[in-house]
Image: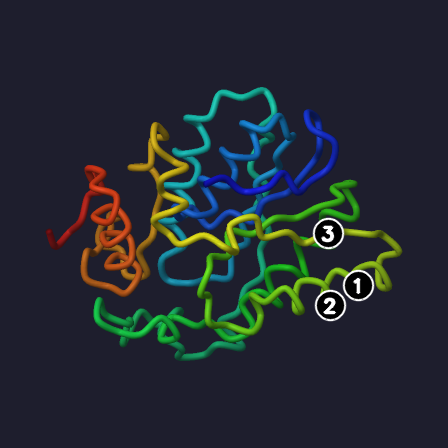
């Protein structure tokens, strides 16, 4: 099972990838590189409690990719503490645990915010497509195809620049995506929302999701968890 080639003439198509440092977006970067694309990873800092550890892991992972198509990481700052206030993503209090439902980790306006700044950057730097690692079963309305198409239309009006927002993994489960990532140095990816001394906590919603994906494919999980 592999995603369709969705972006530009290959080889040499240009695509920006919103990278969080997690399994999905990291593997998406590598997959596009394997298809001969020029890939621009973008990381947006909101001032959330886990971002320091997340960005450090992301940089280590990107350093393992040797393709000539990879471009240096672009970081964009979009601080949200004044809007989010005491939300758990900023305060690190009440972090959704391993047995919480998927919608417990929703961040208000997350994709609206991600695309707002990154699409402007793409228009100014002539990247006609931006990709996200959205998976099958994502429960949030701002990860729907309707939302992506509507936002792309808005960018075209606002910036006079046609841009495509693509989600090549939208029919994939996390285990499906992990299967594509066999052979990558996935120990440098990061999926935790409550890091401990820069490592995965092992007890949050996202750590549990990560563990399940490795277990489903019987792939050795060499992630460093504070709580085994």
Give the structural element (helix, strand or loop) at label 2.
helix
* Marked residue nearer the N-terminal end (3 or 1): 1
Report the colour scheme: rainbow
Query: Which numbered disc covers residue 164?
Result: 3
Q: Are marks 2 and 1 in contact (CB under 8 Å)?
A: yes
Disc 2: CA contacts within 10 A as few (<14), some (14-19) or many (>=20): few
* Count of number-bearing discs: 3
Give the image location of residue 166, x and y in percent. 64, 51
* Marked residue nearer the N-terminal end (3 or 2): 2
Nearer to me, 95 or 93: 95
Q: CA distance from mark 3 to mark 2?
A: 10 Å
Disc 1: CA contacts within 10 A as few (<14), some (14-19) or many (>=20): some
Residue at image point 84% right, 63% down: 158
Give the image location of residue 68, x and y in percent. 59, 20
Residue at image point 28% right, 71% down: 95
Nearer to me, 102 or 21: 102
- The residue at which mark 1 appears reads as 153
Give the structural element (helix, strand or loop) at label 3.
strand
- The residue at which mark 2 appears reads as 150
Residue at image point 82% right, 52% down: 162
Disc 3: CA contacts within 10 A as few (<14), some (14-19) or many (>=20): many
Q: CA distance from mark 2 to mark 1?
A: 5 Å
Q: CA distance from mark 3 to mark 1?
A: 9 Å
Residue at image point 28% right, 65% down: 205
Give the image location of residue 94, x and y in percent. 27, 76
Which image quarter is the N terminus in?
top left
Give the structural element (helix, strand or loop) at label 1.
helix
Q: Seen in the image, is 139 located left or right of residue 178?
A: right
Query: Which numbered disc covers residue 204?
Result: none
Q: Seen in the image, is 215 located left or right of residue 137?
A: left
Nearer to me, 189 or 166: 166
Nearer to me, 61 or 176: 176
């Amino acid at each position: 099972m592999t995603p369709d080639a969705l972006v530009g003439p290959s080889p040499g198509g240009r695509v920006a990838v919103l990278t969080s440092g997690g399994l999905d977006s990291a593997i998406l970067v590598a997959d596009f590189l394997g298809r001969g694309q020029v890939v621009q990873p973008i990381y947006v800092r909101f001032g959330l409690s886990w971002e320091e550890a997340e960005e450090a892991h992301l940089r280590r992972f990107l350093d393992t990719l040797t393709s000539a198509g990879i471009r240096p990481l672009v970081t964009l700052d979009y601080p949200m503490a004044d809007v989010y206030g005491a939300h758990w993503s900023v305060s690190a209090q009440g972090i959704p645990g391993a047995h919480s439902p998927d919608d417990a980790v929703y961040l208000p306006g997350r994709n609206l915010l991600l695309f707002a700044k990154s699409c402007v950057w793409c228009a100014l730097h002539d990247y006609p497509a931006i990709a996200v690692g959205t998976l099958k079963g994502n429960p949030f309305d701002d990860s729907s195809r309707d939302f992506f198409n509507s936002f792309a239309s808005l960018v075209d009006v606002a910036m006079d620049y046609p841009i495509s927002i693509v989600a090549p993994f939208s029919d994939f489960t996390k285990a499906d995506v992990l299967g594509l990532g066999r052979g990558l140095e996935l120990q440098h990816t990061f999926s935790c929302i409550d890091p401990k001394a820069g490592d995965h906590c092992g007890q949050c919603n996202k750590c549990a999701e990560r563990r399940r994906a490795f277990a489903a494919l019987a792939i050795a999980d060499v992630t460093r968890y504070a709580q085994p």
